[in-house]
Image (cartoon, rainbow, N blue to C red):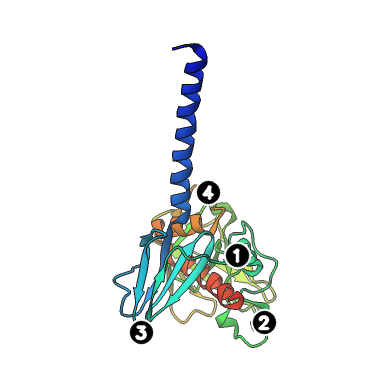
Amino acid sequence: MSCPDIRLSRLGLTGAALLAALAVTGAAAAQSIVVRSTGPSASKYPAGTKLKASDRVALVDGDKVVLMQGGKTRTLSGKGSFTVGATVQASQSMGTTVTRMLAKGPSTRARGGFAREAETAAPSEFRAPNLWLLDYRSGGTFCVADPATLMLWRPDMSGDAALTIAKGGQSETVALVAGAQFRKWPTETLPIEYGVDYQLSGAGLTAPVTVRFATIAAMPETADAATEILMTKGCTPQLDRLVDAMSEAEAVDG
């Protein structure tokens, strides 16, 4: 075989490999993941279930399944049979919501949720404006990439409050002053340890809340990546916050 033939042969193999890689990438991109499932068919489509574009979801009355696909949510409500790969329209509202929820620092917005709700919603109904603010009302596992920048968040900043954080025989009380919605975690006196329970009390809590931290290598750049990480680490409060925000944006745009 001549040198030109060898080069052409190698180019052909390279092209075939590239096409195969693109096919795999396209298949991955078309995949959807169940992020919330309620109703009679919940056990059939539990959260975390991955579905191909060609799959169909059969629901009955009372069912609701929320899919994450391509950086958007899609809510399926029974009764009916739904094609997973149906096109989900992009929207400015959804894009803005995702950007805000994945922001690496505190949002400049005073409160979470949509502006149209701010005048009627009670502070207790507000949601932290991004995933990486620790809403101390929510117990469970919380994913954090950089403990040094972890911020506490509260829904009502109208008055002073004192939050007590305890771990084993250690405790620290941090002040939340009127007009301030954020407060840095006291890393100097109570460093964050992973896989250890912290008990939070006071500051308007009706009962103590237990939080445990899980480490992540880096903050995700997309909603799909965030979903995968939060599910893998068991960071349910943050996943719920993301899904709620995106589902609201979906409802407004839909």
Within 10 Å of disc 3 (Cα), the crowding (few <14, some 14-19, many 20+) is few
Callout 4, which amino acid? Ala
Foreground label between 3 and 4: 3
Separation of marks 3 and 2 at Cα, in angstroms = 31 Å
SS at badge 1: loop
Which disc, if any, is residue 61? 3
Closer to the N terminus: mark 1 or mark 4? 1
Closer to the N terminus: mark 3 or mark 2? 3
SS at badge 4: loop
Residue 223: x %, y % from top left: 53, 59
Closer to the N terminus: mark 1 or mark 2? 1
Q: Residue at x 39, y 58 (%)?
A: 52
SS at badge 2: helix
Callout 1, which amino acid? Ala
Q: Name the residue at the top extreme.
A: 2
Closer to the N terminus: mark 1 or mark 3? 3
Residue 20 sits in which quadrant? top left
Callout 2, which amino acid? Arg
Residue 43: x %, y % from top left: 29, 72
Q: Which residue is mark 1?
A: 90
Residue 40 sits in which quadrant? bottom left
Q: Is residue 34 left or right of residue 135?
A: left
Q: Is residue 216 left or right of residue 253?
A: left
Separation of marks 2 and 4 at Cα, in angstroms = 33 Å
Within 10 Å of disc 1 (Cα), the crowding (few <14, some 14-19, many 20+) is few
Separation of marks 1 and 3 at Cα, in angstroms = 28 Å
